Amino acid sequence: MKPAPLEYERPSDMADAIRLLGSSENAKLIAGGQSLGPMLNLRVATPDLLIDISRIKELHRIEDKADEITIGAGLRHADFEDGRVPSPVEGLFPRIAAGIAYRAVRNRGTVGGSLAHADPAADWPAVMIALGAILTVRGASGTRSVAVSELATGALETCLEQDEIIESIRIRRHGKKTKVGRYKVNKKPGDFAEAAAIVVSDLEAGETRLVISGGRIMPEILPRTAAVIAARMHGKTDDLESVVETELSSRELSSYEHGLFRASILRAAKEVLGG
Amino acid sequence: MKTVSLIVNDKPYTATVQERTSLADFVRQDCLLTGTHVGCEHGMCGACTVLMDGDPVRSCLTLAVAAEGRSIRTVEGYDGDKAMTVLRRCFSEFHALQCGFCTPGMLATAYDIITRLPHADRAQIKYELSGNICRCTGYLGIVDAIEEALKRVHGR
């Protein structure tokens, strides 16, 4: 239960971090260490070099503009829980963050780490997708933008190149009347989700998004169910249960998973519809 | 190997360690403070919880070299602290420990609850304790102890 031998460097800026990433075939970034730490201890991950980016100032900045919020990837879950990070939808960030693991983990774990690790059952990826968030990613050849919905390519896999670091997350400030519904299924507080559904409905902007995630299921947008929720918010009587059945049946879920996801979606939708 | 300097229980420590050494193993083996316990080594059980710059962290998931310059407080480091004195008394009165293996981590988390969440009710105490596992007590005594400590520390 101890890591394999490794080297450790702690760069003080992004340029240095990127240079270090380029210097080794088998280097891993470490920020909060709450996902990578267990993997190191279990020797599921055996990098030759750990690059500690947790003290790089550029990764901790917060920009709060009228129409957009920019969040440094190095901000900790506790920063979100305690309200130190402006929330694009009022109350959403503290609510989501408070459900991530335990306070001792939240004091170290980072939002960038959660996104880069791409665990299907994690909290931030689905929420950031539902918010339409866009990442600024920096590598040896410069910066580029990546929509969070495009980031994960599979469980624990992303489209990031070997030399790239998530620098910040940009989120549109949503309309004041935006409604959120969220339901997470787990056996005890703080556990990863077996199933989760989040609905973010900004009727002023004409955007309603529904994202499911959890267990082995990568975050997925359910556009048809989202459209029915939006319609119902406008007073129409489109049937919710049947579109949920249709969108879930096209995925290969066990009957147990199907039941959990169905319940999560319906409960999240109920919260948004004010039922 | 790397040389690391940090403060543990208000005392400076410098040691040369393997980079892969956890903070838990550092305080236990280099500082000879064995009150911090190692359980699951993957962040779930909470036995290794210590304070770093005043905030609870998992010492099993923190590299010693990553804690350079930080101020660490282990269970041995609270003498004279009023809130911890009350907490220890309540743990004793309410049978919040048996074998004591989870206790240092429980105390770190409980200390954080009492100081950060002075208005925590029973439900919130239970929620905040979900990251500390106890195999002996069944938890009720621990919740009772913290509930009472909150009252005594915050004068209710």
Image (cartoon, coloured by chain):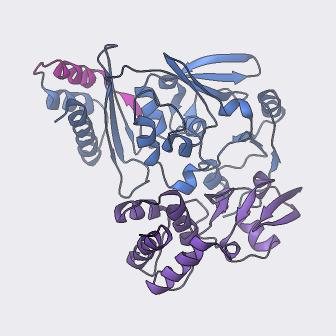
**Residue at image location 78% in from the left, 29% down from the top:** A18
Left-right relation of A203 to B70 = left
Check the image and report above or below for A245 versus A67.
Answer: below
How many marks the image carries: the answer is 0
**Residue at image location 43% in from the left, 71% down from the top:** B151
Check the image and report above or below for A13 versus B56.
Answer: above
**Residue at image location 51% in from the left, 44% down from the top:** A82
Q: Nearer the viewer, residue B156 or A136?
A: B156
Q: Nearer the viewer, residue A26 or A57?
A: A57
Q: Is residue A224 found inside the magenta-colored segment of the image?
A: yes
Where is residue A163, by image quadrant?
A: top right
Chain that appears purple: B
List x then y, in percent, for residue A33. Answer: 65, 49
What's drawn in magenta, residue-wise? A219-237
Left-right relation of A170 to A247 = right
Residue reaching furthest left? A237
List x then y, in percent, for residue A107. Answer: 59, 50
Residue B97 visible in image: no
List x then y, in percent, for residue A10. Answer: 80, 42
Residue reaching furthest front? B155
